[in-house]
Every structure is written in structure tokens, then in C-alpha cells.
Amino acid sequence: MIDIKLLRDDPDLVRASQRARGADPGLVDQVLDADARRRASLTEFERLRAEQKAHGKRVATATPQTRPQLLAEAKQLAERVKTAQADADEADRTSTELSRSVDNLVEPGVPAGGEDDYTVLEHVGHDGPWVPDPGFAVRDHLELGEMLAAIDTERGAKVSGARFYFLTGIGARLELALLTAAMDLAVANGFTPMITPTLVRPAVMSGTGFLGAHADEIYHLGTDDLYLVGTSEVALAGYHSGEIIDLAAGPLRYAGWSACYRREAGSHGKDTRGIIRVHQFHKVEAFSWTTVADAAGEHQRLLALEKQMLALVDLPYRVIDTAAGDLGASAARKFDCEAWLPSQRRYMEVTSTSSCTTYQARRMGVRERCADGTLRTPATLNGTLATTRWIVAILENHQQPDGSVLVPAGLRPYLGGLEVIEPVRSP
């Protein structure tokens, strides 16, 4: 959550961040009022508690004549202390709840506005904003996937409903190749591989900032009070919850491989064909714990790894600096890599890397021990290294006129040297 000391010292900075996100700047004043009430009620409780202790000493040394009166006063004082403690506890709950509702402070330079107000930082693999047509009528990924016997959405819907699918044959092998290549890249760059839980407790889901405005995107198992994760970021953020970590030797870096689940609430009619926007997929997510001073450098490191993965599968893409209103509650800055989608002549997000500064660590109760023995709050960062959706871009960008698909050179070692995926069905 937001650093309450920062909010007290520079409320205008937080108000400006809220406005850039399109959020309510008045929430800052609500938090300040609640914090003032919390501190006042705590001061009153501590004053009464001290008075109670002093009174207790008088009772202990009282004469038989004065003891009854002092005991009666002690009883009254105990009730006042009890009421003051309840008031302080309630004020603390209110203050904490309001503080947790303030989104992370947006970093300087982040574009203001909503989903369409991003800044394009670079195009990779092509010149200018548009990728040239390949010179033949392109097929979309679902048609290609069906010709290659790689994707089966009809039976996915029969078994599980809309937005579910089977990856079959080469489709399943492509996903495993992608994720294994991503994990290999992560390990080669010092990340510890992790197979993470996909069910987490409410405190962990809330701690990462996912139970705010987009809570309706998350599957909740009411009987068990557990949430299905939409990214292994959630489990990796919870891994050190309540701990004091040691960053003296550098960042703690993890790469989580997990199934991911998203309800896609509010996306009716969007990308309903194929496997672009689905309820279940797999992903390898990089996650770093680092010092605040090193967070910006770590963010660029994660972006560089994502770009290496995109180069491995030879996709044309662009990098965008996401606007404040599209960051999500926990991110202070986010860079997206969007691959070109030939069938729709548009870009499609395939990776995202976010700097969450101290927001998640503070909510998770994670601290780092400094060289002088003091404690401070570390920063967290995350970045997607590969996910099921990449198959969409790979099939479409490497398709040939006859419906075959060239295997990107970087994936061939993971597919037994396979160079071309040949159609097994007629279009």
C-alpha cells in the first residue's frame, strides 16, 4: 500500500498520481483524516493506559480506608481504557482500509490517461508502426491451428464452456517449447525456477493489489475461501510474506511456471475467436525482490529479457510505456511488448513488466535488513517471459501460403530440430 509517511509529507504528489490514473484525488484527504483520527485515538488510549498503571500503584499501597474508593475508580478507569482501545482499534482498521485503497504512486514520466494514451517507445523487427503484408492472404491463428491439428476450441467449449480449448499435438508441444525456453533463459540469468501454487489465500491475493477494481476478473472458491491466480506473480509475492529478507548479495529473483485463470469479466465480444482471450492458460513469470535504489535498473533488466524471448521466436513487436490509468493498482510503471497480429492488422500484448516499488512488499509485511541492521521496505518487480497467447503470434507471423508454419530457429532445439509444421487437414 501507499507509504503513509509520504502521503502525510507530500499529499499533493499523491493527489497528482491519483488524477493521472483517473482515480479520485479526494481519497487522499479521506486517508489523512482517518490517519489523524487513528493517531489521536491511539494517543488517548496510551494516556489512559498510563493513568491506569499509575492508579494501580496507588491501589497497591492504599490504606484500608482509601482502598474501596480507589478500587471503584480503578473499575471506572478500566472501562474507559477498554472503550479507548476499541476506538483506537476501529480507527486503525478504518485508516488501514482507506490507505490500502490508494493506488501505487505513479513514477515520473508515465503518460497520463487511460488504455489508449500509451507512448510507443520503439518498434522491433520492422520500420514504422505497420508491418508489411506478407504478399498472400493470411489465415488467422485458429484456422492455422485447426489445419495443423494444434488447437481445438470446439471440444474445449464442449468440455468446459466458452473460452476454453485443447492444445493438441504440435500445439501442446509448442507451448511446452515456449515455456521451457523461457525458463532456460530465466535460469541462465540468475532466476530460481519455481512451480507455484495456483490457489492462494485472500491475504495474498489482496496483498498483491488484485482485489481492487478488477476483483471480478478473479475466480473465487467460496467453500474454501481461496482464489485462483491469474499470474504466478501472486504466489511469488506471497512467498516471503511476513519475512525479513536479505538483499546484501543482490536481488532475489524467481521464475514461476503456473497455470493461470481469469474470468474475463466485462470482455464479452472481445477476441472471442481462438485462444487470444481465454479463461485458462500457462505462463512463465519473472519476479524480483530488490532495493528501491536498484528497482529502475531491475525493471530494464526484465524488459531486456522479454525482448530476448521475442527475438528467440522472431516476432515483430513494439514496446509501449503504459498510461497511468491502465497500470493496475500495484504498478508504478509498466512496459508492454505487443506482437504484430497479421490477421487483424493490429498489435496484441504478449508481455508486460511492472515495477511495483514498495507497494506490494508493504502490504505483504516484507522488509529487508540493511547493512547497519535497520529495516526498510524492498521493491518488487514482475515480467512475463512466455505465455500461451504467444502461439497466436507465432502461427500468424510464421505462416506460409500453403498453411504450413515455419518454426522459429530459437524453438527448434526444443522441438527435436523440427523446422516446418505441415498441415494435416485441408483449410
Image (spheres, grey):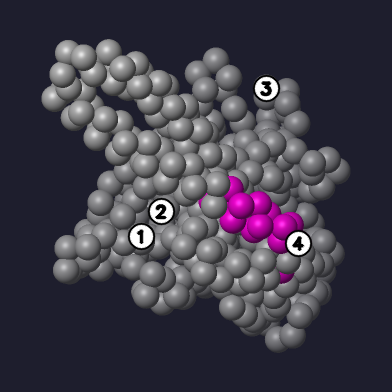
- Residue that carries the numbered disc 2 in the rendered image: 361
SS class of the residue under badge 4?
loop
Numbered disc total: 4
Q: Earlier in the sequence, mark 2 or mark 3?
A: 3
Residue 288 location, x and y as percent?
38, 60
Residue 367 location, x and y as percent?
31, 55
Q: Which mark is residue 377?
A: 1
Vertical position of residue 164 compared to residue 22: above or below: above
CB contact under 8 Å: marks 3 and 4:
no
Q: Nearer the viewer, mark 3 or mark 1?
A: 1
How far is the residue under mark 3 from the one under mark 4? 40 Å
Q: Nearer the viewer, residue 307 or 423?
A: 307
Q: Is residue 280 visible from the viewing direction of this image?
A: no
Q: Nearer the viewer, mark 2 or mark 3?
A: 2
Residue type at mark 4 is: Gly
Q: Which mark is residue 159?
A: 3
Q: Earlier in the sequence, mark 3 or mark 1?
A: 3
| Residue 270 painted magenta | no
